Amino acid sequence: MAYAVNGEKVKKAARNSIPLGVKVSKLTHDTEQYLEEILSVFLSEIGQSELKDRLSYCMRELAVNAQKANTKRVFFKHKNLDINNEKDYSTGMENFKSETLSNIEFYFSKMKEEGLYIKIVFHSKEKTFTMSVCNNVEISVKEQMRVYDRIARARAFNSMEEALSMVIDNSEGAGLGIVILVLMCKKMGLDEDAFDIDTEGGETVAKITIPFSEIHLENLDSLSRGIVEEINELPQFPDNIVYLEKLINDPDSEITHIAKQISTDPALTADLLKSVNSAQFMLPKRVDNIVEAVKIIGLRGLKNRLFSTGTKRLLKSKQKWLWDHSHKTAFYAYNLARNFKRKQDILDDAYVGGILHDIGKIIFSNIHPMLLERINGFCKERNIKRDFIEDLSAGLNHASIGGLIAEKWNFPEPLIQAIKYHHLPWDCKPEYRSVVLSVYLADALCKIETGDLVYEQLDPEALHEFGITSREQLETVSRRLVEAFSKEVS
């Protein structure tokens, strides 16, 4: 049975730093071809096509070893042998290879009954590409030591030819394969530390981590900074908002003076009253007094909303769905922070961080033809390929660009962190992690609703931060947020 690769889904995952996982119960010729095609599309999208053949070998080798580990578990169980008992292990391994090869379909069916799987995950981050091959049985200490021993042996060889000419322990059929894998990593300019195998959450995870090309990174960073510099011609924040910010920062300002200044801006007044009367604050009665509204929302919350209102005025995207997505993300982030983090001081940052998290994408949706022409000139002058602009505009660096713009416009640090790291929450400053994680999960839940993400692509550690350990729990959280948001906008 041939499998069709969803190229757009693969590209979207590559561009947006979303892990892309494929889970299979057994390896066949068709699944191997399918995985290789996904790898090819993924690497092409991040500008690393030249690694395809070498990484394909590594992927096959690790996947075969993962399947072998799963087969070994069901084989030992079928023979009533304890895989962790040294005597039983020796007895079982005497006939493991011959018996399983001669009756492989039987053992495949056993693996399926036991719910055993192989999972391959591709993940591009700002500076690295990671390929993980997982199977849901934990590697034993003895097996892990055997792998590390083979890695150590690989140090003695300078080429594949040397390795092939030597007699290597092949009692389980994986000795030479691991050595060649390490040599393959060396050919890609990596040291042995690029490969690791360990247990995580009940799985054995074999992982290869590859830094992106330094040239590719420098060009992306250079282009990001160049685009932000070119945005000098975008208008600054409206005078009224700039003046209000100064008032808020002045310790001698009185709330009545701030409220009076807000009242001169009908749109800002409407936004403020809409916010305090929303479900976020759960007030017993409607508030129509601006002074009361400022007291309820607080000066920090008011300041955040100034940045939100100012940004929306400047970036009137023709793509309405971007702002619609941002508002839903904001609602979800606020409620995740309130119900799970239970830290009152982060609620407003989570809400406004959700509204502003995609300003990098919104900037691109507003790019004027003259600005685009100058960016093209910037690329030509520095000999940067045209596809880097596509990388940036499609998502690969939109968070970095958004973060740079937020810094340029002097946004508060929690908002800068939420914008810059909403795809990579563990890279943010630790003191802002609760805010960034709330925005990350809110954005992910919105994308699950639209079919752009699936449960397996979410960061398990991020889910754990919200006490979510299963698909069913996530679906319950998602359903409640959808229902609450529907009431909010109805």
Image: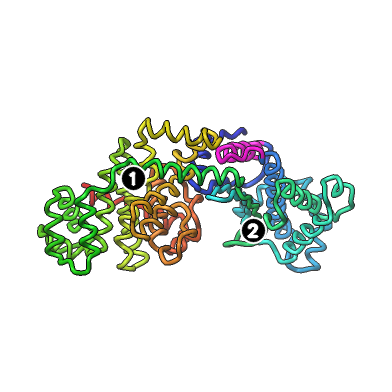
Picture layout, residue 5 above or below residue 357: above
Give the main secondary structure, helix, strand or loop, of the magenta stretch.
Answer: helix
Q: Which residue is mark 1?
A: 325
Which image quarter holds the N terminus?
A: top right
Task: Compare marks 1 and 2 and give the one earlier in the sequence.
Answer: 2
**Residue 112, position as x, y percentages in the image:** 62, 49
Determine the residue positioned at 22% across, 65% down.
250
Between 111 and 352, the one lying in front of the other is 352
| Colouring chosen for the image of the structure | rainbow
Secondary element at tag 1: helix
**Residue 360, position as x, y percentages in the image:** 39, 45
Q: Which residue is mark 2?
A: 204
CA gap, disc 1 to disc 2?
36 Å
Query: Mark 1 or mark 2: which is in front?
Result: 1
309 falls in the magenta region? no
Span shown in magenta: 30-50
38 falls in the magenta region? yes
Q: Is residue 79 visible?
A: yes
Between 413 and 352, the one lying in front of the other is 413
Picture layout, residue 67 above or below residue 53: below
Q: Determine whether, in the image, residue 382 is placed left or right of residue 94.
A: left
Determine the residue positioned at 34% across, 53% down.
354
Between 21 and 331, the one lying in front of the other is 331
Secondary element at tag 2: strand
Q: Give the image quarter of residue 35.
A: top right
**Residue 221, position as x, y percentages in the image:** 51, 46
Amino acid type of the residue tagged 1 in the rendering: His
